[in-house]
Amino acid sequence: MSDCHDCGHAKTASALGVVPPPKATVQRLVAIVGPPNSGKSTLFNRLTGLRQKVANFPGVTVEHRLGKAHLPGHHDVDLIDLPGVYSLQPRSEDERVTFDVLNGKKSGLRAPDAVVVVLDSTNLGRHLPLVASILSLRLPTFVVLNMADDLRQRGGSVEVESLANELGTPVALISASTGEGVSSVLRFLTGGIAIPKPVELPVLNDLPACRQWARRVSNDSGYTRPAPPVWTRRLDSVFLHPFWGPLVFILVVGAVFQTIFTGARPLMEGVQAAIGNSGQWLRALMPDNMLRSLLIDGIWSGVGAVLVFLPQILLLFLFIAVLEDSGYLARAALIADRTMARAGLQGKSFIPLLSAYACAVPAIMATRTIESKRDRIATILVAPFMTCSARLPVYTLIIAAFVPDKPFIGPFIYTRAAAMMGLYVLGFAAAVFTARVLKSSILKSERTPFVLEMPAYRMPTWNSIGLRLLDRSKAFLKRAGTVILGVSVILWILCSVPMIDGKAPPIEQSLAGTLGRAIEPLIKPLGFNWKIGIGLITSLAAREVIVGTLGTIYGMEPDRDAAGLQAALHRDLTFGGALALLVFFAFSMQCMSTLAVVRRETGGWKWPIIQFTYMGVLAYICGFVVNRIWS
């Protein structure tokens, strides 16, 4: 008997002859679990209205996420989105999270009242063994076969009622991305839940037995495997080709950087003009006093200098989102496995390192998917070398000030884009070198085979990409309105004291100038003046803060250049000093948030201190050498 109220896909608990439990006295807590990249977070987002990150490759979710589903009839259900697992025998930190939550061992979190198991319906044979592990917990369980639309389009099918009888628990065929069949999940969450009927399960520690059980259950449920995706095979024949694959990867990266420079330029110029004109308008409107100086010279110049780079950052994240959602990044990880092996790492390290191009903090958390502790520590230590988006404003500012925009590789790649690519390669090379040193010495270990389930290519949706860019814009503006604003105000105060005759002193005689001149002897060998020195100190909070700092410092100078920050830097820095500044930011650890998350993930201050010292010394030595060569 099948429940046909809505979609006809689900077989309800009552249909299986189970009795709803007594009414709960506390709010129901339901865990969402499934293999990696099966669509758990997509379902979680649809049920809760939250926007946890989703992407078309395994290992995106590495810790549990809590949300609340507001259901019809004023029913609220707490949901937990858990990292992907293939079994309940944890081998990595993220799998341990899922195991602990399901078994009620997670500190500060009670055991779930029920479980929703999300499986990829196009890969049922590989995903079904997890259901056996979940059923053995004897928790009320609802099995969701996701990606129903993909299964149907490729000619696959499954008899939901037969599968429910085989498993002794309700089953539904849904598509979390389109919402098809999700109403059956809602009915499970709001209705009576019960422990599944006893069914024959395999010995869970016996992998061949589990696979044989999965084959039998699939066959008895009339499961027809979908045809292999034609376009996936065709594209993989190019993208995974030993020669064409790496070449395509390089071309894709080159196109991304060229587009970031050329495509974002009109928007950046528009934002810069808006900030400049509005600042001049406010300056003319307000009387000449300290409040005007604070607002225009301090806040407007400091925060505005960073906001200019928002279009470039959004363009970068647009490309990252397209590559992630399409499934191409999983192929890039496979291509990079050979390079990772030379550095002593495994291909699984590539996903966290790739995430570090957006931000090192989630990248370091993503290392939880790596089983080997030594490989995980090595990946954590090298991840900050990847060029995160916070470095982008710094790189763009210096490159635009010192590198002329001329054709470099025909009309396709220009010199500024090539310089930006060079800095990304420089950071990656430093990571590979450091990993090689670590893996051949203090973190030496046996190499483990790299296994990654290749997702089918999917067309990214504008809705998903738009929401991700919206979240990224909010995060950037929040940072500009908190960290950068706070630093700008503090810096303005330091630049305004001690006051002389009731007015701010010449900036070099201010407290900030005194502090900068005190450290100038240390940074002078790198070609930096005291103004850059202040920027290096404030950028310890976050790398892009140096741009706001320089904007405030140069904005408070009485002879400030109307051509802007780039012209001021060109006046104060030599070409060698500019290159040294780029190299310094490529190698140094200028991010307290990253240090904090490294301490949390490694369980102490030993590794963060080693990491900060090593990166700082490397940045200083390389900056010194570059300045000596080019000055």
Image: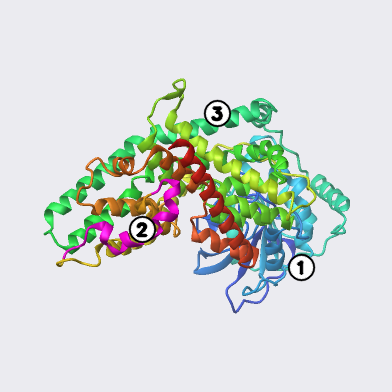
Quadrant containing the C terminus in the rendered view = top left
Q: CA distance from mark 3 to mark 1?
A: 52 Å
Q: Amino acid at mark 3?
A: Leu
The residue furthest bottom is 25
Earlier along the polypeptide chain: callout 3 or callout 1? 1
Asked whether the residues under the numbered discs 3 and 2 touch, taking CB atoms below 8 Å apart as contact, a structural biologist would say no
Q: CA distance from mark 1 to mark 2?
A: 65 Å
- Name the residue located 50 percent from the left edge and 60 percent from the top edge: 593
Magenta span includes 101: no
Q: Is residue 225 above or below residue 24?
A: above
Asked whether the residues under the numbered discs 1 and 2 touch, taking CB atoms below 8 Å apart as contact, a structural biologist would say no
- Name the residue located 25 percent from the left edge and 40 percent from the top edge: 563
| Residue picked out by circle 1 | 138
Element marked by disc 1:
loop
Q: Which SS does the magenta portion mostly show?
A: helix
**Count of labels in the image:** 3
Q: CA distance from mark 3 to mark 2?
A: 43 Å
Q: Position of residue 262 (x, y in %)?
A: 39, 32
Q: Amino acid at mark 1?
A: Arg
The residue furthest top is 410
Magenta span includes 512: yes
